[in-house]
Amino acid sequence: MAVMCAHRANRRDFLQGRAAVDSLAELAQRALDREHESDLATAPYRLHLARRAMACEFEIILNAGVHADAAELAVAALDRIDELEAQLTVYRDTSELAAINRQATQGPVAVEARLFELLELAVRLSAETGGAFDVTAGPLTKAWGFFSRRGAVPETADLERALASVGSQYLKLDSQQRTIQFERPDMDINLGAIGKGYALDRAAELLDAAGLTSYLLHGGQSSVLARGGQAGDGNASGAWTIGLGDPTRPGRQLARIDLVNQSLATSGSRMQSFRAGGQRYGHILDPRTGQPALGVLTATVIAPSAAIADAVSTAFFVMGVDGATEFCRSHAEIGAVLVTAGGRGKRDVHILGLANSQVRLASHDAANQTTQHADD
């Protein structure tokens, strides 16, 4: 995924964090599809600040010369992301979330106010997606070996034991006391499917409060938050234009998506998987069955907040096209682009709840593509 300055970024680089979300010509040049190269000579200057956190690179992109304190504010926003990682990570025993996971089976645990709000949002989204998104799926991630990045098919008994500890309905949240308690043994919260988006939302709060009205944030390029629009480049839409890679053809672009005061997230399992017995197992698990989700190649969601986009893109990857379509019909603020494998070597692109003007599919290989809209 890349900010479009008349250039494209491939899906492989997007998922591995190598393709920059950028508009500078020298950086964009590396992500160009050479068959469709464009003149970048008039690309305007932008300010880019980046820092590694949450196992990926976070970057802030600003139109240069708009705000006198832009660089200092961007650094402050990145500092906030560092602070949130220290609070939310399950890979540090000193984090607040790790303390919750250790103590909440024994009794109520007090939770910091904003983290409590995030947990409330996660529980609500779990209910609205029928359990397809669930922050209590940590035991499943461990059972499959993805937590330690040593994937292996679990024994049936181990998987059943993990499943018994999964379910947001077993999280007891007391809004008056602002506490959380686990109602099942061995429960384990992991915010990996919502944490990056939440960090972007919190960083954006800082920039918004300082008066910045046009910028782009991304975390690992799979989570993006846009405010205002990118300047120059003949950009008449007043939007930040994001390039969406084709999951079936590395080096090819699937679509361009315009974002104005919206967030976008893409979920896919191709880069985090393992093979066993001739079968590939992806890291996105269905919390309801404990099995890797099948059927969707990538799920991209556009939503009002980055946390919601993150969570719902994971849910849509699990729910599939039919479930995602129904969800979008009852949630007008949510749009999506899902890619699935089609027949005869084609891949199907499903556009849900988005106007044609916001999503522009690439036409270079239309013969290999079937496109369906939610109303089809």
Image (cartoon, helix red, strand yellow):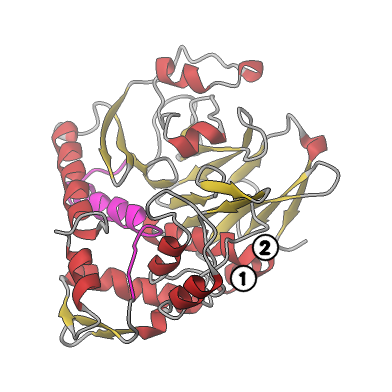
Image coordinates of residue 25 in percent, x first then y, are: 43, 17
Q: Nearer the viewer, residue 277 or 71?
A: 277
- Is residue 181 left or right of 347 when viewed as pictured? left
Q: Which residue is mark 2?
A: 321
Q: Is residue 333 above or below residue 147?
A: below
Residue lying furthest right: 344
Q: Earlier in the sequence, mark 2 or mark 1?
A: 2
Q: Looking at the picture, which amino acid does disc 2 mark? A: Val
Image coordinates of residue 145 in percent, x first then y, are: 44, 56
Residue 196 among magenta residues: yes
Q: Looking at the picture, which amino acid does disc 1 mark? A: Arg
- Is residue 173 left or right of 251 when viewed as pictured? left
Quadrant of the image occupied by residue 96: bottom left
Residue 253 among magenta residues: no
Image coordinates of residue 136 in percent, x first then y, are: 38, 72
- Is residue 319 left or right of 160 when viewed as pictured? right
Residue drawn at the location 82% of the way across and 36% of the way down: 367
Magenta segment boundaries in residue numbering: 187-214
Q: Which residue is mark 1?
A: 329
Instruction: Please tell me whether mark 1 sits on a helix, a strand or a loop.
Output: helix
Q: Nearer the viewer, residue 352 or 222?
A: 222
Q: Is residue 355 visible?
A: no
- Is residue 331 left or right of 96 when viewed as pictured? right
Q: Nearer the viewer, residue 12 or 31?
A: 12
Q: Nearer the viewer, residue 324 or 165?
A: 165
Quadrant of the image occupied by residue 238: top left
Image coordinates of residue 330 in percent, x first then y, are: 57, 74
Q: Nearer the viewer, mark 2 or mark 1?
A: 2
